Image (cartoon, rainbow, N blue to C red):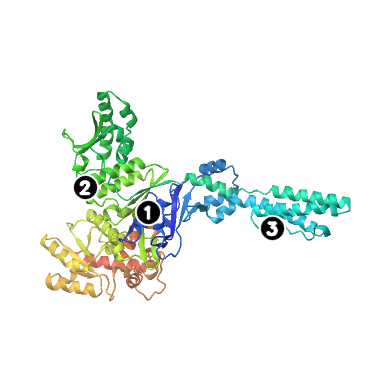
Amino acid sequence: MKLLKFRIQYYKSIKDSGWCWLASDLTMLAGKNESGKSAILEALRDFDTNVGEIPGSAFPLDESGEPTIELCFEIDKSTLDEIAKEANITIDKPTRELIAKDNLTILKDADGRYDLEQKISEALDKQRNEANQQHINKIQSIVEKLKKIEQLSNIAEPKLDGNIEEIQQTAAQFIAQANPQLSAITDETKRQEVSESLTAIKEEWESLQKESPSNKFLDEATTYIPNFIFFSDFLDILPFELPLSEAKNHKTVQDFAKVAALDLDKVIKTDDIQRRKIILNKHSATITGDFMDYWGQNEIELVADSNGENLVLGVKEAGKTMIFKAEQRSKGFQWFLSFYLRLNAEKDETNIILIDEPGLYLHAKAQKDVLKILEDVSTETQVIFSTHSPYLIDPDRLDRVRLILKDDDGTRIENKIHKGADNETLTPIITAIGLDLTRSFSVAGKQNVLLEGISDYYFLQALKECVPKSKVHQANLTPCTGAQKVPQMASFLIGLDLEFLAVLDNDNEGKRIAKELFEKLSLEDTKIIPVSDKDGYSVEDLFSHDDFNSFILDDVKNEDATIPNSKFLKDKKLDKVLLAKKFFEEVKKNKAGVSLSSETINAFKELFEKISAGFGSP
């Protein structure tokens, strides 16, 4: 079963996380420190069937509720058939269609009990309940007739609105009290009819089905719940030398053996020292090539060897013979090695891997290697991890990011990264986008356009594709990190003797920067271009009100056309960088589907013409 989404309630700082939908491969939980990222991973860990009741430390300090964890799984037809067969139940077509449509949601309560979503449970039990109700209705009808007989009128009626056990017990009591009264009925025919009616009641209550198909289904379905493998650190260092007899008891050695397809039992049982060395050396080569695909920092090999009755596991530089202990390498290498071995040992379609803040010991390049490993593992195993590192966020895969936010109502999960987050939460994401841009643009173009920020870059790049016959396709758009950085970049370009101009918002800050460029750097008026002649306008204000609602904004819409787009973003605390990037990617993917109004096209066309004129183009 594949996990699609989850929801956590009353677990530590989480009162209600809301539903968190998983990405297609990796799912990243991004948030500030103490926002509740670790608590989310711990809650998922506690859903594992090997975990009994939820630990007391997970209960909210304010005693506002008891932990509940809900997971929704996609379940294919073959798995559903297997569960039905093993549970010895029949699942009708409507119930199968319901599960196919809504998927399978399983809940776990504080006491460690699992339960099905109510509508699924009711659908599975529907046939049984309908059949039981028919038996109950027959009992009710028979009892009503019998109660009209004088000798039986004072006998308490069976309780037919309780559970099956209560119905059977009270029906048996009714029969037990009625039987002694038969002798008081003088009419033999009537006495025979009453006796047959009591027998019929017994047959009906004995036909009631006690076992719940939904409970039988749940018992089997829980055996298909993936294992949750939780990593909060990777501090088990690969030992340099240890007795072969202890090898199978050491977790990191077991990980090494599993990844390298090394049969430790075979090594231990091999008495021939030379043969043992051959076996180990062969598996050293197996893991070296794979590991080196990721650890691109140095030429390092992993080595397995033996020393008498001891197993030797070390590292060495390529082309050299001296073997080092893992503990003699850097903290980063030690962490990366443990991380690599553990993840590759645990990757399996029946597992879900949870990782809390991977790569804290590693520098930027190595963190990117961590991301490569996670991407590789996610082809076989679902991976969910928390991070605040921009190097673990792929700017082209922001669909992987889920924001973890915390306010007075506790920790919650936001599936859409441009919605409701503060600057600190978004910092690693915006940084990742900025780092990506530094690899894709240059300040050495023939014509350089300085922009205030990244959102301006994405908006203009997108509109270059949308404005017919734009004259700025060859211009090199260079975003700064705010208007105040434009003079610094301008000074740099002057020093390189490169042609450039600056495009600034027509707000107070933009006007201040324009004055500084003119007075301090002697930049010509034609090289200082406001995005619009309208006072207070920013790049996003060049979009018409309807276009901005349709193509830029997402869930939240600006219902008041008198409120400028830039002010609406600020008032609603929406991150314009993320919105601009989303728009840019949509244009790249489906330009024909982005049908902008003539009002928007003309506004950007006018700006592009000013830029062309600034470079001396007609």
Callout 3 amino acid? Lys
Residue depth check, mark 2 versus mark 3: number of the one nearer the observer: 3
Q: CA distance from mark 2 to mark 3?
A: 70 Å
- Three-letter amino acid code at disc 2? Lys
**Residue 426: x, y in percent?**
30, 62
Callout 2: helix, strand or loop?
helix
Could you say whether the residue bearing mark 3 is in a helix, strand or loop? loop
Q: Residue at x 19, y 74 (%)?
A: 512
Secondary structure found at label 1:
helix
Residue that mark 2 sits on: 331
Residues under labels 1 and 3: Cα distance? 47 Å
Q: Mark 1 or mark 3: which comes first in sequence?
A: 1
User: Which of these two is toward me, 235 or 500?
Assistant: 235
Q: Which residue is mark 1?
A: 41
Q: 10 Å neighbourhood of mark 2: few (<14), some, or many (≥20)?
A: some
Task: Between residue 469 and residue 529, name the one nearer to us.
Answer: 529
Crowdedness near tag 3: few (<14), some (14–19) or many (≥20) residues, C-alpha within 10 Å: some
Residue 438 percent location from the top left of the image: 22, 56
Q: Is residue 604 visible?
A: yes
* Contact? badges 1 and 3 (CB < 8 Å): no
> Which disc number belongs to residue 159?
3
Q: Quadrant of residue 491?
A: bottom left
Amino acid carrying label 1: it is Leu
